[in-house]
Amino acid sequence: MTIDNFFNLFLKELENQSSLWSYYKYHTDTKSLAFRKAYFCQRLQYIADHITRKDSITWDLGCGYGTTAIFLALNGFKIHGTTLEFYFKEIPERIKYWSQFGDVNGFTFDYEDLFEPSTPRNVFDYIIVQDTLHHLEPIQDALHILHDHLKPDGEMIVI
């Protein structure tokens, strides 16, 4: 799925998901739609350019409503998202919507405390930390945990 196609389907999804409007602001602030679209698509392109190995496993730490993870799953990647409790309840409905456009089974998600991870070490080829790093305190401990969960040749993508 291309980024442009994904974005257009994303806007259609949001038309029926007013609970997500205040977060994404595409329908509440139409004057900045062009800017917000460019920002969204450029960020997604940056991630897509860096997650290249199809047999990889990615951890999207702070995945929010799972938008990036859904895009990656639709493109054949295996991705696990960790999100906060108030985002968690919206994700199943989003998966239902996106499953009509492709296979999203590669996306799994949970609500978990980073400082008490259940995932074994050296599991992930990539870790995405998008709009999240500044929330992880103490930062040195968080970075140590992230490093431990990357495979030896793994990469962390911080946005």
Image (tube, rainbow, N blue to C red):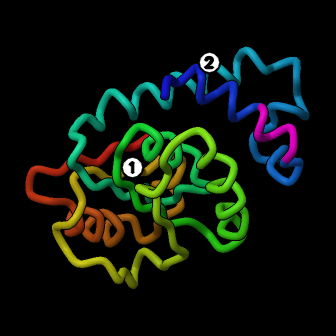
Q: CA distance from mark 1 to mark 2?
A: 20 Å
Dominant secondary structure of the residues highlighted in magenta in the image:
helix
Element on which disc 2 rests: helix
Instruction: Verify whether residue 15 appears in magenta.
Output: yes
Residue at the disc numbered 1: 128
Q: Which residue is mark 2?
A: 38
Q: Is residue 118 above or below residue 33?
A: below
Q: Residues within 10 Å of mark 2 (few under 14, many from 20)?
A: few
Give residue 70's position: percent from left, percent from top: 53, 47
* Residue type indicated by callout 1: Ile
Numbered circle sitting on residue 153: none
**Circle 1 sits in a helix, a strand or a loop, which is it?**
strand
The residue at 49%/29% (across/down) is 1
Question: Could you say where residue 139 lies in the image, as x and y percent from the top left?
Answer: 39, 64
Considering the image in quadrants, where does the C terminus appear?
Answer: top left
User: Do labels 1 and 2 touch, CB within 8 Å?
Assistant: no
Measured as percent of width and height from the top left, residue 30 is found at 88, 22
Tell me which numbered mark, 1 or 2, is placed earlier along the sequence. 2
Label 2 is placed on what type of residue? Answer: Ala
Q: Is residue 34 above or below residue 53?
A: above
Between residue 36 and residue 125, name the one nearer to us. Answer: 125
Q: Please provide the residue range marked out in magenta.
A: 12-16
Say if the magenta span includes residue 23. Answer: no
The number of numbered discs placed on residues in the rendered structure image is: 2
